[in-house]
Image (cartoon, rainbow, N blue to C red):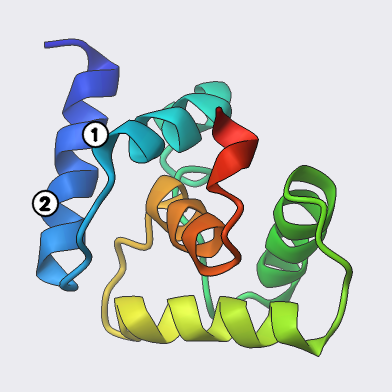
Amino acid sequence: MSKLDDLISTYQEEASKIGLNLDNDLLMKVTKGLGPSIYNADAAKVSCSDQSELDRVKTSYLVNKLGLTDGPELDAAIKEVCEKFGSSNRNKHRALFYYMLAKKFGKEGIYQ
């Protein structure tokens, strides 16, 4: 198995723990879209307790990548995803986090 396949397997396990029904094709595309950052332990996860990190998710991903307009609904969506993972869960994998946001906003087509 490749490193990418190992990560996808890890993401699938984590998704099942939080009751997330995955579209594996979309998950693969989101993961590949993150490039080499998924192999860096720090960059591969989102810290919901770090406001600058959440601002980066909003600006870099939601606004720049998905083309959404900045507003309170973006902050609310990020908070909702953080809550879905749970505050005690330290495995907020960026690929799953972005996957959930793309699904929430119906932006799966970005990855076609």
For label 2, the SS is helix
Q: Position of residue 9 (x, y in %)?
A: 14, 36
Q: Quadrant of residue 19?
A: bottom left
Instruction: Describe residue 63's horizontal placement relative to residue 41 as left or right.
Output: right
Type of amino acid under label 2: Glu
The image shows residue 57, relative to residue 95, as above or below, that is below
Pick whichever, 26 or 3, lies toward us.
26
Instruction: Describe residue 87's horizontal placement relative to residue 72 as left or right.
Output: left
First in residue order: circle 1 vs circle 2? 1
The image shows residue 30, relative to residue 72, as above or below, that is above
Which residue occupies 59% across, 76% down?
Answer: 78
The single residue placed furthest to the top in the displayed view is 2
Q: What distance separates the C-alpha of mark 1 from that of mark 2?
A: 9 Å
Which residue occupies 67% across, 65% down?
Answer: 53
Q: What label does residue 8 carry, if any?
A: 1
Pick whichever, 88 or 29, lies toward us.
29
For label 1, the SS is helix
Q: Position of residue 56 (x, y in %)?
A: 75, 59
Pick whichever, 109 or 5, lies toward us.
109
Say whether residue 49 is visible. Answer: yes
Say whether residue 40 is visible. Answer: no
Which residue occupies 61% across, 52% down?
Answer: 107
Instruction: Describe residue 62's horizontal placement relative to residue 104 as left or right.
Output: right
The image shows residue 93, relative to residue 110, as above or below, that is below
- Classify the position of the C terminus by image quarter: top right
Type of amino acid under label 1: Ile
Q: Position of residue 12 (x, y in %)?
A: 17, 47
Which residue occupies 45% across, 52% down?
Answer: 99
Q: What label does residue 106 carry, if any?
A: none
Q: Quadrant of residue 54?
A: bottom right
Q: Which residue is mark 2?
A: 13
Pick whichever, 32 or 52, lies toward us.
32
